[in-house]
Amino acid sequence: MRKAVFYGHAIPYLEDIEIKGRFIIIEGPDGSGRSTQIELLSSKLEADGHAVLNAGLRRSELIGQGILEAKRNFVLGRKTISLFYAADFADQLENKIIPGLRSGYIVLSDRYIYTLMAREAVRGISSSWSHNLYGFALRPDIVFYLDVDPNELVHRVFKKNSYLDYYESGTDLRLSDNMLESFVMYQKLLSKEFKRMQKRYNIVSIDGNRSVSEINEDLQRRIDDYLQSLKV
Amino acid sequence: MDYKKNNTEKIIPLKGKLIVVEGIDGSGKSTQLRLLEKWLISRNIPVFFTEWNSSETVKQITKKGKKSGRLTPITFSLLHATDFADRYERNILPLLHAGYIVLADRYVYTAYARDIVRGCNPNWVKKIYEFAIKPEIVFYFKVPIDIAVDRILAGRPRLKYYEAGMDLNLSNDPYESYRIFQSRIIDQYESLSISENFTIVDGTMEIEESQSFLRSIVSKLLPLNITKNTRRVTRI
């Protein structure tokens, strides 16, 4: 058991909780292979005898669907969307992630607050506002960022969907009338934000331009090393 | 509380005025604001009325969460902030730019008071609402707790779970819980009334009396007076 560490001081009633599990985040743009990696890592960790719980953005039963609907209608302002996501994230944190960690799970999260903060920063929302907003977030044990060249990302996205997602292309930012160009520009902006946050949040950058198995080997080795280091 | 701090919004002069009423349920604030609206309409002044927790998009979700009893102080706070942001981004701010008198039945102070009572960190809450502009006037309807609670409880209404503050485990009796919850909110309002410079309205006054007090203050802000003055200047 150890004391949970939060980024800020937003949840006084949770400040003194104790957790047993480990909290690992995989960050990275759409098409960077996050979900594939999480699947692979989960199976391996479970095979090794760990209880694994998957979490991620926009998975809360409370609000998840509402965000999708609202986005589809293109009606919401930027602050509204940010707060919506924050509420959804809070619901997951309190109802899933924290209980999981308290009962000793390894929680693998497909994205975390860094994606939300990067999206907000790119949209001109002040970073001090975002940092405060997510002050109630639990500090993870490891954060990986799958860094993929935006030009390579395009191909992976096309392979998966055959079209570019409106939001993942940052179309609302009107960077370019050409959707492909807009996608690349937007992903570059996000990647820049991640680099900016790297130090502050101790984000480990992983070369995501490699094959699935190469990336997996890299991630698995780092996680194993980390778990091993806890035993000593 | 200065919207210019935010680098996303272009600095457009606000031609309108924002007038807010705050106070606990049963303090008479909504009645007074509706009368103020009627009066402004009768004077052909463009006016917009907005209520706490009323964004169509967000309300459905908040309702669902409330029903399930799943909300925690943080999600409760964030959903109300989302609701506010939606009304702010789509109605309040554009209408102020367009020169409307915006009448808000509750504003960020309601969030401060309720969220702080629920245990959220005060600085966290205040920073979230930092994008909201400071109103021209905040009328705070001050009533002794017993009067307000009696007004609300007179008909023995069924108090909703969160409305009664049942999530705070103050008492098993909803009415008792409600009373304690409201008195804590009053304490928050009291400290805000000084730091945020509220204009205090005695909520025990007769309706007509309060209304003429409100009108006397609001009339000083009306664009009609301003245009009269500027006309005089241009004629000279």
Image (spheres, coloured by chain):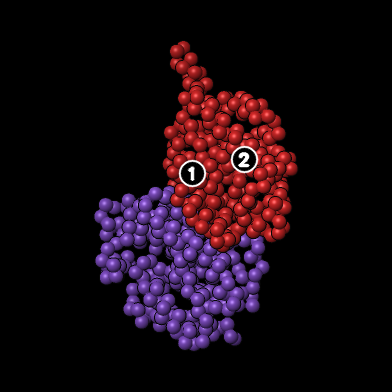
Chain colours: A purple, B red
Residue type indicated by callout 2: Glu
- Front one among B109 and B8: B109
Q: Quadrant of the N terminus of chain B?
A: top right
The answer to whether any part of residue B16 appears in the image is no
Q: Chain of mark 1?
A: B
Q: In the rendered structure, find residue A80 and report the number of the disc placed on it.
A: none
Residue at left offset 34%, top offset 69%: A31
Residue at 59%, 77% (x, y): give it. A103
- Identity of the amino acid at label 1? Tyr
Q: Which residue is mark 1?
A: B88
Please say if A224 is above or below B112: below
Q: Residue furthest bottom?
A: A48
Q: Verify CB contact (< 8 Å) between mark 2 and mark 1.
A: no
- On screen, B21 above or below B86? above
Task: Find residue B131 and report its horizontal and vertical position in percent.
Answer: 52, 46
Does B231 appear above or below A204? Answer: above
- Percent across and percent down for residue A16 are 66, 68
Q: Which structural element holds mark 1?
A: helix
Do the residues at pointers 2 and 1 share their chain?
Answer: yes
* Front position among marks 2 and 1: 2
* Mark 2 closeness class: few <14, some 14–19, many ≥20 residues within 10 Å: many
* Side of B90 where A175 appears, left or right: left
Q: Which residue is mark 2?
A: B22
Q: CA distance from mark 2 to mark 1?
A: 17 Å
